[in-house]
Amino acid sequence: MADVKMTNIPSMNVNRMVELLGDAYCTVLGRGQKLMLLPSVMLWGPPGIGKSQAIRQLAKRIEEDTGKRVVVTDVRLLLFNPIDLRGIPTANEDKTLAVWLKPQIFQMDPDENVVNILFLDELSAAPQSVQAAAYQITLDRVVGEHKLPDNCIVIAAGNRTTDRSVAFKMPKALANRLMHIEVEGNFSAWKAWAIQSGIHPKVVGFLSFRQNYLMKFDAASEELAFATPRAWEMVSNLLNHVSDDVDKMFPLISGIIGSGTAVELRTWAQIYEELPAIEDIFDGKNPPMPKGTDAMYALASSMVAYAAEHRQELARLEKSILYADRMPPDFSAMLMKDYMYIEKGFKEKLLGLPAFSRWLSTKGRLLNGTV
């Protein structure tokens, strides 16, 4: 059976994919049309690239734009067999026919104020017998005798066979039922998400300094621990919820991203000891500016994290913008761009600050060429 090739399908980062699909779904919903008008979607990409995270972002986008509640049902098809999808057979009331009990995962709320997303993850890792059972789901929104509600979006995801993960070649009959998108890694898109999601500033700062470390997946490598967007989120969880001491967390971090990358993170994180107190910057005390490229990345990521946590304190935020005006121009522009990522519509709040308006008038041209 021929493999599905990636050469003739669009490749885009997570933010762009969420934008395009979000626009499509929200338009159909806004017109009161059925979601079945749009084809089911298949997201392709290497392990850890952010396919599952993209579904959560898409759900949030639909909620914000439509006011409807979005419920995501995550089905890991690798753990299923065809009977699991159709349901358990049992006798009807007069014991003359077999009927199929609907699986709990397909018990969805049909209310018009709800949007259901059925996320069929690891579709390419499922045996072809399970993939075949997914035909009806993707095309007709039915599972055996059970029909998915009209308010259901079906999105599948999986790794490419070239990734050397568990992946079976997709039958052409199934492939032709789907809209295919290859999800690619993109640091700028990831950083915007990371700032809004509270990813630890040491992770954001390090990856701003070493952008090529965001995704270190190598299909030919036998290494078990390697850096991916998913892995960096796990590192962030350690630093946010256990200890932000990278040296103390080093053994656990090594088990997530590998010892080589963890050593570089630990070495780089030592620069934080030389940074001025971030509170002093926001209090307008104008502490000395650190020197060195690595220190500037660390400072900028720390300032963004502090600004996000204190986003309502606009007077203090303005003092940090005055401090940022003293930074090297590229880093000043990077910081202002990152401030705009803090939340949707935050740029409009910044425009209400005289210091930000002055910064835009003198250095705004640098925003398109930030480091």
Image (spheres, rainbow, N blue to C red):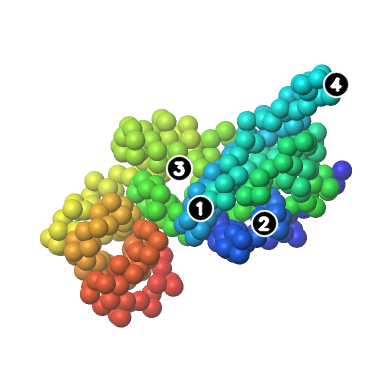
The Cα atoms of the two marked residues, 2 and 3, are separated by 36 Å
Left or right: residue 233 versus residue 304 is right
For discs 3 and 4, the disc positioned in front in the rendered view? 4
Say if 100 sits above or below 257 in the image: above
The Cα atoms of the two marked residues, 1 and 4, are separated by 43 Å
Say which amino acid is labelled 4: Thr
For discs 3 and 1, the disc positioned in front in the rendered view? 1
The Cα atoms of the two marked residues, 1 and 2, are separated by 15 Å
Residue wearing tag 4 = 96
Labels 3 and 1: the sequence-earlier one:
1
Residue nearer the viewer, 195 or 148: 148
> Pointers 4 and 2 in contact (CB under 8 A)?
no
Labels 4 and 2: the sequence-earlier one:
2
The Cα atoms of the two marked residues, 4 and 2, are separated by 36 Å
Labels 1 and 2: the sequence-earlier one:
2
- Secondary structure beneath dot 4 equals loop
Labels 1 and 4: the sequence-earlier one:
1
The Cα atoms of the two marked residues, 3 and 4, are separated by 54 Å
Residue wearing tag 1 = 68
Q: What number is the disc on residue 34? A: 2
Q: What number is the disc on residue 233? A: 3
- Residue found 45% across the figure and 42% down from its top: 233
